[in-house]
């Protein structure tokens, strides 16, 4: 089994090193720009040594993993004298193999292995737990990819081979699903701040709603899992949201509008919103609509008629329509 070296002992590097060791892959050397962190990680790995440089890691290992910031991959790779046949991979989700060109020019095999996971500040009780069932995106030389797939399988994860041109979109999807979800919860809790509810309490109250939505997506897919006023074609409720946000937290209006428009597109694609309801929603979502409606005293757009079946669309002459019911019943919070 090949010897593995780690350059970079941050959250991702530490989690990967501990999981590899737990899966039986020997991590023999660790280097980091934070010596204390490297010392802590090496102490937690059987047989691992703390070394002073990336070159020392490369001298000790058959496969070197660069878990450093994206901007540092190229400089680190350029500063090492690589051996022909040696392997070096980075863990960036967006960078191509270009920054590893100095290693490839020296005869080393190059690749990337990106765990589609977020790692906490403290190590997991079971080092492999954060990797079980996740996807790891791979790119690399043909001779190296099977070795990387073996490592991923040993971690209990799934491999996904990506062409270089796909990585920015792959990584953008990961950011939307993970980082922006964190931001959304912060924004949502901020709306309750106006009510005198602190962020921790607000997030604690909202998390069951988030978990329920995620579970419905996992079980049924995004379209059937969609609930709430836009899925119901309820423009009046959306208008009330916009007016309230404009008065209390106007900085959150652009985010609400952007998400509402994307949600409307999903609801329309799923046949959940009729044309008239969609048009009413588009009107209230227009920039400044809540200001003009409030100033003029005009009545808010009416919601869908009570006798209209959920998700019904006006029929085209030769096109049958079907409605997909929500994955679960609506709740007042939605």
Image (tube, helix red, strand yellow):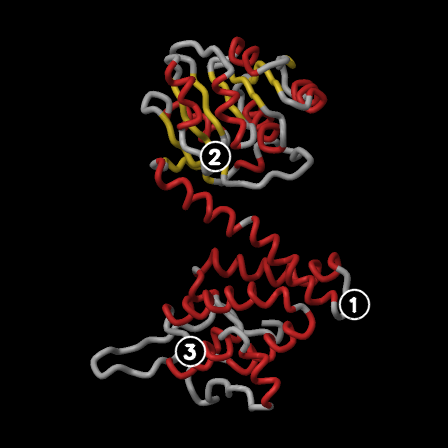
C-alpha span from label 1 to label 3: 34 Å
Residue 71, position in %: x, y? 53, 31
Residue at (47, 65) in percent of width and height: 225
Residue 95, position in %: x, y? 45, 34
> Is residue 25 depicted above or below 287 in this figure?
above
Judged from this view, the residue extending furthest toward the left is: 318
295 left or right of 283 in image = right
Q: Secondary structure at mark 2?
A: strand
253 left or right of 263 in image = right
The residue to which callout 2 is attached is 114
How many numbered marks have been drawn onto this rendered protein structure? 3
> Is residue 64 depicted above or below 211 in this figure?
above
Which mark is on residue 278? 3
C-alpha span from label 3 to label 2: 40 Å
Local crowd size for mark 1, using a 10 Å CA cut-off: few (<14), some (14–19), many (≥20): few
Local crowd size for mark 2, using a 10 Å CA cut-off: few (<14), some (14–19), many (≥20): many
Please identify, in this view, whether the residue under mark 3 or under mark 2 is nearer the observer.
3
Residue at (59, 25) in percent of width and height: 8
Q: Secondary structure at mark 1?
A: loop
Residue 233, position in %: x, y? 47, 79
């Amino acid at each position: 089994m090949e010897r593995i070296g780690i350059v970079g002992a941050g959250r991702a590097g530490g989690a990967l090193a501990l999981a590899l060791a737990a899966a039986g892959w020997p991590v023999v050397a660790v280097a980091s720009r934070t010596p204390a962190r490297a010392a802590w990680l090496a102490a937690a790995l059987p047989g691992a040594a703390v070394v002073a440089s990336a070159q020392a890691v490369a001298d000790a290992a058959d496969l070197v993993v660069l878990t450093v910031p994206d901007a540092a991959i190229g400089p680190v790779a350029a500063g090492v004298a690589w051996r022909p046949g040696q392997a070096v991979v980075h863990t960036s989700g967006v960078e191509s193999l270009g920054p590893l060109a100095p290693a490839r020019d020296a005869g080393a095999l190059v690749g990337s292995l990106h765990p589609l996971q977020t790692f906490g500040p403290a190590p997991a009780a079971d080092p492999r737990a954060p990797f079980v069932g996740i996807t790891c995106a791979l790119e690399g030389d043909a001779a190296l990819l099977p070795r990387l797939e073996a490592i991923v399988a040993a971690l209990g994860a799934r491999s996904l081979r990506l062409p270089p041109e796909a990585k920015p979109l792959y990584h953008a999807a990961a950011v939307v699903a993970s980082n922006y979800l964190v931001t959304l919860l912060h924004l949502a809790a901020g709306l309750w701040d106006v009510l005198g509810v602190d962020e921790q309490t607000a997030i604690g109250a909202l998390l069951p709603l988030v978990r329920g939505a995620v579970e419905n997506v996992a079980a049924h897919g995004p379209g059937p899992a969609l609930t709430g006023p836009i899925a119901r074609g309820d423009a009046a409720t959306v208008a009330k949201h916009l007016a309230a946000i404009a008065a209390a937290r106007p900085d959150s209006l652009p985010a609400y509008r952007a998400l509402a428009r994307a949600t409307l597109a999903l609801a329309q694609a799923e046949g959940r919103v009729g044309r008239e309801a969609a048009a009413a929603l588009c009107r209230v979502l227009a920039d400044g609509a809540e200001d003009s409606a409030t100033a003029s005293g005009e009545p808010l757009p009416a919601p869908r008629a009570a006798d209209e079946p959920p998700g019904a669309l006006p029929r085209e002459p030769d096109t049958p329509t079907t409605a997909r019911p929500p994955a679960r019943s609506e709740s007042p919070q939605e």
